[in-house]
Amino acid sequence: QVQVVESGGGLVQPGGSLRLACTASAMDSGTTFRMYRTHWYRQAPGEERELVALTLSDSDTKYADAVKGRFATSRPDATNTAYLQMNNLKPEDTAVYFCVADVLIMGRGQNSYWGQGTQVTVSS
């Protein structure tokens, strides 16, 4: 019904910044939806997936201690795109980053969709 795609990952030096995008789109022309909230997770090699940012409301996002003060999410815009701004990146931020999009589908209700992930590598 809805496809979620992350983009913006890549290789960055320590101390650098990246902005990840999370875009939701309908998989068929008959689906009308709105993305109203996103959450972000990451998974480093050999590690379990961990929560990076959990959006509770428009004004309340909980961040993992490891990224607090460096990462910030944005609200979805009219194009069903939201962002994760990552500043002062560290090598330990290296991971595949996943977006979870909470969407409201007309006539069907709410649902959540995961993206396929985007690789972020922080290295000099």
Image (cartoon, rainbow, N blue to C red):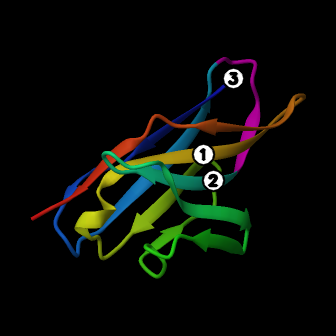
Q: In the shown orientation, is residue 104 left or right of residue 43?
A: right
Residue 77 seen in the current view: no
Q: In the shown orientation, is residue 20 left or right of residue 58?
A: left
Name the one closer to the observer, 120 or 64. 64
For disc 3, the marked residue is 1
Who comes first in sequence, dot 3 or dot 2? 3
Q: Quadrant of the C terminus?
A: bottom left
- State the image coordinates of residue 29 (x, y, percent, origin top left): 69, 18
Name the one closer to the observer, 4 or 40. 40
Who comes first in sequence, dot 1 or dot 2? 2
For disc 1, the marked residue is 100
Residue placed at 30% from the left, 46% from the top? Answer: 45
Q: Residues within 10 Å of mark 1 (few under 14, many from 20)?
A: many
Name the one closer to the observer, 40 or 103. 40
Q: Residues within 10 Å of mark 3 (few under 14, many from 20)?
A: some
Q: Above or below — where is 19 with respect to 6?
A: below
Residue placed at 43% from the left, 66% from the top? Answer: 85
Distance of label 3 from label 1 (alpha carbons): 14 Å
- Please, what secondary structure does the residue beneath circle 3 have? loop
Q: Above or below — where is 17 with respect to 77?
A: below
- Residue 38: mark in rendering: 2
> The disc labelled 3 sits on which kind of residue?
Gln
Label 3 or label 1, whichever lies nearer to me, is 1
Q: In the shown orientation, is residue 57 left or right of residue 8?
A: right
Report the span colored magenta.
28-36
